[in-house]
Image (cartoon, helix red, strand yellow):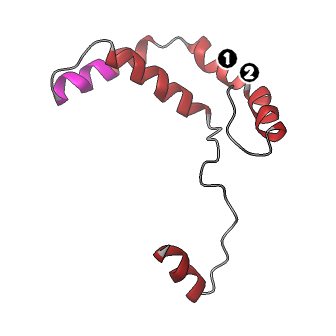
Amino acid sequence: MVSKEWLCKKHIKVLAWRSQSPDLNPIENLWRELKLRVSQRHPRNLTDLEKICVEEWAKIPPAVCANLVKNYRKRLTSVIANKGYCTKY
């Protein structure tokens, strides 16, 4: 709320944006994939976490990325049909 007031006082126009708007960036889906893979390996410390992240990232097939891009139109259509609210895609 303080941020909004400051922006208003400075006459800065802000776009109306839903607080729970869906993140359509395909990288978010890749981060989720990486998180799932890393959590299954149970890293014990920060060094272990970094090593596992690098290893698991390298194992994600390029087809996973291609599929996310390929299905982008479907996700956009779903969000538009749901009037900007989150959807299951």
Q: Position of residue 16 (x, y in %)?
A: 70, 64
Query: Which residue occupies the foreground of this view, 48 or 21?
Result: 21
How far apart in space, not on screen, are marks 1 and 2 (Cα)?
Answer: 5 Å
Give 10 or 2, whichever is nearer the viewer.
2
Q: Assign a secondary structure to mark 2.
A: helix
Q: Is residue 51 magenta?
A: yes
**Please, what is the three-letter code of the amino acid marked with disc 1?**
Asn
Quadrant of res 37: top left
Q: Is 47 left, or right, of 11 in this rendering?
A: left
Q: Which residues are magenta?
A: 46-53
Q: Where does residue 82 sit, x and y in percent of width and height?
A: 79, 39
Marks 1,2: beta carbons within 8 A? yes
Is 40 drawn above or below residue 49 in the view shown?
above
Residue positioned 33% across, 12% down in the render = 40
Which residue position holds label 2? 70
Compared to residue 72, the image places residue 60 above or below, namely above
Which residue lies at the image location 69% right of the left edge and 66% below the top edge?
15
Residue identifier under label 1: 67
Q: Residue at x 63, y 86 (%)?
A: 11
